[in-house]
Amino acid sequence: MRIDLISIFPAYFEPLALSLIGKARAEGAVDLAIHDLRDWTTDNHRTVDDTPYGGGPGMVMLPEIWGRALDSVQAMSPHPPLLVIPTPSGRPFRQVDAATWSTVDHLVIACGRYEGIDSRVAQFYSESPEWLGVQEVSIGDYVLAGGEAAALVMVEAVVRLLPGVLGNPDSAPDDSFSRPDGLLEGSIFTKPPMWRDLRVPEPLLSGHHADIATWRSTDALHRTERHRPDLLGTTEAAPPEGTTSPTGGN
Ligand code: 6GU
């Protein structure tokens, strides 16, 4: 897969040379290119923004500059790209988006700063046949100074799902937000069996597979009740044999 990142702070993406993503790039699982938006400016000051029509605080990023940048990364591409615009006013970015985007040939992520990008950019590219569409997404209910940190989050969520990237691909289906039961991943332990008076739960030490599975289901349910009660009772999946539904209701 190909991912283009466009930003006025390309150095923000230096961590993408490290760890799992750095390795995925070196192995050719992902072709990641980072661009400076100012490369598409035409004035001596390399201006990327102007004041908002209708008044109000802050600055808005110019559609002309974004249009040239996006057209040029698209023109290099043999496949219609999906345009992702990180913004706190977008819909929530979820694990299912990471999974869907990991199947696309070409992602372009347009990182805005200031008050954001002129809204005609999202409108234009959502109607363009050269593009797969536009997704305006937020990573949570808080405000960042720009889309870059959110783009790092999204790239990591997508790239770890690409074929050959995870050390053990069998572990991904058990991740929180990927489990068929919709629960969070439960507690995990390693050696030693006793640490500072805290014992690893007995079933995990027993070697008894049914007891281990039962303990893990209960633990995942308790963790979800405590940390994310909003996740309970939203899956259509039947509870395992001999158990009752988390909410008793669905
Ligand atoms: Cl995607 N961008 C910005 N600027 N702030 C955010 C966000 C994105 N998601 C949550 N807050």
Image (cartoon, grey):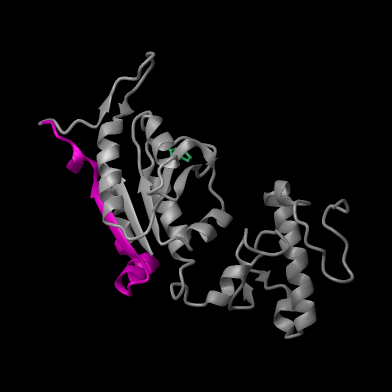
Residue extending farthest bottom: 207
| Residue at 56 percent of width and 56 percent of height | 95
Q: Is residue 159 magenta?
A: no
Residue extending farthest left: 44
Q: Which one is in front, 192 or 238?
A: 238
Vertical position of residue 40 compared to residue 186: above or below: above
| Residue at 32 percent of width and 68 percent of height | 25
Part of the protein shown in magenta: 17-43
Residue extending farthest top: 55
Q: Is residue 49 left or right of residue 189?
A: left
The x, y position of residue 138, in whole percent, is: 50, 41
Q: Quadrant of the N terminus?
A: bottom left
| Residue at 27 percent of width and 28 percent of height | 49
Q: Quadrant of ligand 1?
A: top left
The x, y position of residue 109, in whole percent, is: 37, 48
Q: Which one is in front, 186 or 141?
A: 141
Q: Is residue 138 left or right of residue 117?
A: right
Which corner quadrant of the image does residue 119 belong to? top left
Q: Is residue 44 left or right of residue 108?
A: left
